[in-house]
Structures are given as structure tokens and as C-alpha cells.
Image (cartoon, rainbow, N blue to C red):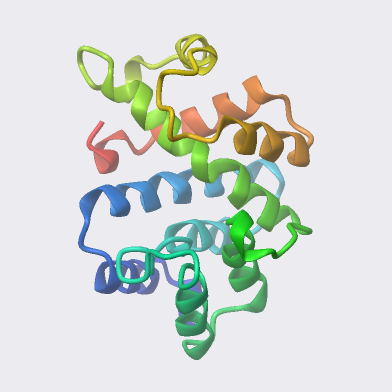
Amino acid sequence: MEWASREGALELLREFTTNEHLIKHAFAVEAAMRAYAKKFNQNAEKWGVTGLLHDFDYERFPTPEEHPFKGVKILKEKGYPQEMMRAILAHGDHTGIPRETLLEKTLYAVDELTGFIVAVSLVRPSKKISEVTVKSLMKKWKDKAFARGVNRENIEKGAKDLGIELKEHIECVLRAMQNISDELGL
């Protein structure tokens, strides 16, 4: 089955996405999903591929009416499992799909947070994620003028739905992203 291959998923991502920022976002979400899969004793490959593909259609179909619906239609045609497609549908509040499974809740919880961590990394003089700490993230978290586009409420809700303290959630995603700093260009 195609979903079992990160290479196949990466090929699909690159077929639909040329924007390097979107590709790096996919890598960040994938890394966070793999970290949580290990934490929750789940299938890291399936969770990683779900993270890698959650926004693969966004560049071509950026409107709320199209994303992620068009992408999920493509995934269905390619034989991806229902649980992965449902998680991708549920990662956006605008879809109206309630998050019920651990996979769905985790994808929602990590998606916005990866963007916040990148934003904090980019304001470091070195622009290196290795220098970002949970403490520095929490400090920027309180500064509502910083990274205004990041929906902090969604991140807090995501952590709560996972039953994890916000600080622990931030640390888990930060460590996962630090492990792939070269792929992220940070």
C-alpha cells in the first residue's frame, strides 16, 4: 500500500507543492507526529505520513472550500486509509469534522505549533532552532504581538484534547523539530 512508504508520500507532496516553506512545514509536522506516535505507542510511519501529507494540496487548492477536501479525494483515489484521510479532514476547524481519535487530535495539536516554533527560531540572531528553548518559546507565547497569525487558542485546545500540559506539548514538538533542523533549514 502506498501510504506505507514515506518516499511515496514525499513524491506526492512534491508533485503538488513547490513552495519550500510549505514543504518544510510538512517536514516539521511529520517529525512532531512521529514523536507523538512513539510517545503514544502508535504506528510512527502512518502518523508521520499523515503529518507529511496534511497540507499537500494547499498550494493548488488554498481556499477553505477546497483544502483539504480536494487532497483527501486524491488520497482516496490512491488508496490511503480512511483514518489518515479523516485526520487530515479534521485538522481544520472549517471542515466541521470533529476530532475523535488520537491521530486526529495530535495532528490538530501540532500543526499550528510548528509554525510558532519556526517563528521563534527565525528571530534568534543565529536563526537556529537548536538555540530555542521551551523557556524562550513560553516567553514569546505571552507576547500576543509576536506571530499574530498563530492561533494560540487552537494550540492550547489541542494540547488539552491530548491531555498534555502546554509546556510539555511545546517541548515534545520542539525536540522533534530540533532533530530535523537540517531539513528545516534551521
Q: Quadrant of residue 89?
A: bottom right
Q: How many tags in the picture?
A: 0
Q: Nearest the camera: 121 or 34?
A: 121
Asked whether the viewer can see residue 178, the reply is no
Residue at x 41%, y 44% (from the top left corner):
28
List x then y, in percent, for residue 41.
Answer: 71, 49
Q: Residue at x 61, y 78 (%)?
A: 81
Quick check: 27 left or right of 73? left
Furthest residue toward bottom: 77
Measuring from the top left, give residue 116's x and y in whole percent. 44, 30
Residue 110 left/right relative to 183 = right
Residue 117 falls left or right of residue 125: right
Q: Residue at x 48, y 61 (%)?
A: 54
At 39% from the left and 53% from the top, the residue drawn is 26
x%, y% of residue 11? 29, 72
Q: Is residue 32 above or below residue 129?
A: below
Image: 128 above or below 180: above
**In which quadrant will I find the C terminus?**
top left
Q: Position of residue 32 (x, y in %)?
A: 51, 43
